[in-house]
Image (cartoon, rainbow, N blue to C red):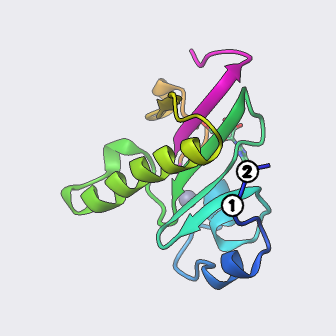
């Protein structure tokens, strides 16, 4: 459990639910829309962060833009503010979960880069890790 953070189903999270366009084919879009459940640890305009369903570290959170972007190769100059804010959310979630001393931040880019869910996301991993990503 994330300490001191709003949980899925809280009034705060419901009030910030996303009502924009999502792809019904995309797993993370379905989480963004609320169609699929997730252990949400942070939500703000344009960004959601939730626990990885198969955590490989004590903390393993995914920071995800609400808008569908396939992968990092598809961001544009106009996404600069979004990308910066995603990085700040990664820092904030890591700190909130007790990893002020540091954490692993990584992004898979495309299937050749190991990406299995084609919706941009940052992995935030902290504490003991059962295995490192290859
Ligand atoms: P990647 O392989 O870098 O694209 O990362 C995708 C991550 O999404 C993996 O670590 C999966 O465990 C995680 N994942 C897949 N389905 C879900 C889900 N329904 N909820 C949360 N995390 C998921
Ligand atoms: Zn998507």
Relative placement, left or right, of 77 versus 15 is left
In which image quadrant can residue 23 be found?
Answer: bottom right
Q: Residue furthest left?
A: 77
| Residue 86: numbered disc | none
Element carrying mark 1: loop
- Pick whichever, 90 or 72, lies toward us: 90
* Magenta stretch: includes residue 47: no
Quote the CA–CA distance across marks 2 and 1: 6 Å
Residue occupying the point 57% across, 48% down: 93
Label 2 close to label 1 by CB (< 8 Å): yes
Q: Position of residue 44 (x, y in %)?
A: 52, 70
How many residues crowd mark 2 within 10 Å: few (<14), some (14–19), many (20+)? Answer: some
* Magenta stretch: includes residue 123: yes
How many residues crowd mark 1 within 10 Å: few (<14), some (14–19), many (20+)? Answer: some
Ligand 1 within 8 Å of disc 1? The answer is: no
Residue occupying the point 43% across, 56% down: 69
Q: Quadrant of ligand 1?
A: top right
**Residue position marked by numbered label 2 in the rendering:** 2
Q: Position of residue 1 (x, y in %)?
A: 80, 49
Labels in figure, total: 2
For the record, the magenta segment spans 119-134
- Pick whichever, 62 or 6, lies toward us: 6
In which image quadrant can residue 73 be found?
Answer: top left
121 up-or-down from 108: above or below: below
**Residue position marked by numbered label 1 in the rendering:** 5
Element carrying mark 2: loop
Q: Quadrant of the C terminus?
A: top right
């Amino acid at each position: 459990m994330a300490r001191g953070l709003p949980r899925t189903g809280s009034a705060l999270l419901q009030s910030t639910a996303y009502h924009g366009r999502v792809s019904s084919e995309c797993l993370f879009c379905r989480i963004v829309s609320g169609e699929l459940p997730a252990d949400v640890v942070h939500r703000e305009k344009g960004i959601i962060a939730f626990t990885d369903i198969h955590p490989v570290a004590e903390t393993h959170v995914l920071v995800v833009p609400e808008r569908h972007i396939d992968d990092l190769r598809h961001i544009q100059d106009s996404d600069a503010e979004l990308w910066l804010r995603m990085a700040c959310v990664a820092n904030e979630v890591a700190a909130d979960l007790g990893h002020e001393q540091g954490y692993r931040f990584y992004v898979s880019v495309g299937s050749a880069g190991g990406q299995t869910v084609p919706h941009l996301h940052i992995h935030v991993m902290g504490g003991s890790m059962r295995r490192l990503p290859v």
